[in-house]
Image (tube, rainbow, N blue to C red):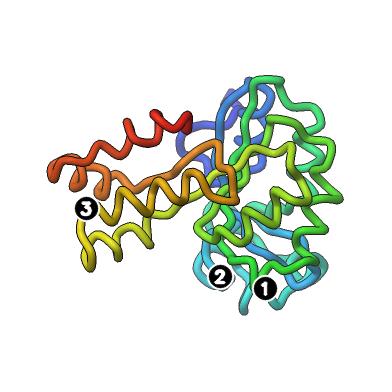
Amino acid sequence: MASASPATHDPLFSLDVMQMGLAHGASMELDLRVRADGGFVVLHDEDLEGETTGQGRISQKTLEELSDARMRDGDRALTFSEDLALMLQSAHPDALLQFDMKDDYEAIGEKGIAHLAAHFQTMSASVIVSGHCLDLIVAIKEKLPHLLRGIDPTGTLVDIYRQEGLRAVEKSLLADISGATEPDTIYLQWSLLLQAARDGLDMVSLCRSEGKR
């Protein structure tokens, strides 16, 4: 008899996989896209066509309009922020769920921040919210100061590296670390880390010296 347990061939962001991970205290990452009603759906792309059977821009769709779409990988129902909030209520105390926010503050707005506050206000260290938009992370900090925060300045740092050099990268990274987001974790692309290391800057040690993961 075949096992019903999630396996390595299960679809990315499978609800079953996330439920099992949270029950066992795993650390997991997922992508979030904002909906038209201010809620979120677990998807990477800004359009539905690539990952789902739906069509159109996610930010223009409500929960009701997305409810019939299926994941192309595995023919599964979509996972929404409401589902995540429910799962986290019974998560293992060591579980950590990282929300990788794919939209910026302009797209998410106060409606999206209010949705996060309404659904994740009682969550403690079981959630870390991260993203490339520093304004968004600051806004989340103001509404949900108890959640862990991460920033990903890779895109900006790559541009600075090309235009101004390594010392400017170090200065910018230190400014982000000590900035208004007050991040717990710094996310950096491996190729940037390796190139900087070859040129004489250990970005991992720099982050750790400032007390950041």
Between disc 3 and disc 2, the foreground one is 3
Question: Which residue does the numbered mark 2 point to in the structure image?
Answer: 46
Q: Earlier in the sequence, mark 2 or mark 1?
A: 2
Going from the N terminus, do you reach mark 3 or mark 2 first? 2
Q: Residues within 10 Å of mark 3 (few under 14, many from 20)?
A: some
Looking at the image, residue 44 sits to the left or right of residue 170; the answer is right
In this rendered view, identify the residue nearer to me: 39 or 137: 137
Tell me where residue 38 appears, x and y as whole percent: 78, 66
Q: Which image quadrant for residue 86?
A: top right
Q: Measure the C-alpha gap from mark 1 to mark 3.
A: 37 Å
Q: Position of residue 39 (x, y in %)?
A: 77, 61
Identified at 13% across, 45% down, the residue is 199
Q: CA distance from mark 3 to mark 2?
A: 33 Å
Query: How many numbered markers are drawn?
Result: 3
Q: Is residue 191 left or right of residue 23?
A: left
Q: Secondary structure at mark 3?
A: helix
Indicate left or right for 94 with 82 as reference: left
Q: Is residue 31 above or below residue 9?
A: below
Residue drawn at the location 73% of the way across and 27% of the way down: 91
Amino acid type shown at disc 3? Leu
Evaluate if marks 2 and 1 touch, with contact meaning CB atoms under 8 Å apart: yes
Front position in the image: 188 or 179: 179
Q: Residues within 10 Å of mark 1 (few under 14, many from 20)?
A: many
The amino acid type found where label 2 is placed reads Glu
Q: What residue is rendered at 73% in x and 67% in y?
A: 66
The residue pinned by badge 1 equals 59
Residue 190 higher or lower than 154, as above or below: above
Q: CA distance from mark 2 to mark 1?
A: 7 Å
Three-letter amino acid code at the position of disc 1: Ser
The disc at residue 31 is none
The disc at residue 166 is 3
Please say if 9 is above or below 76: above
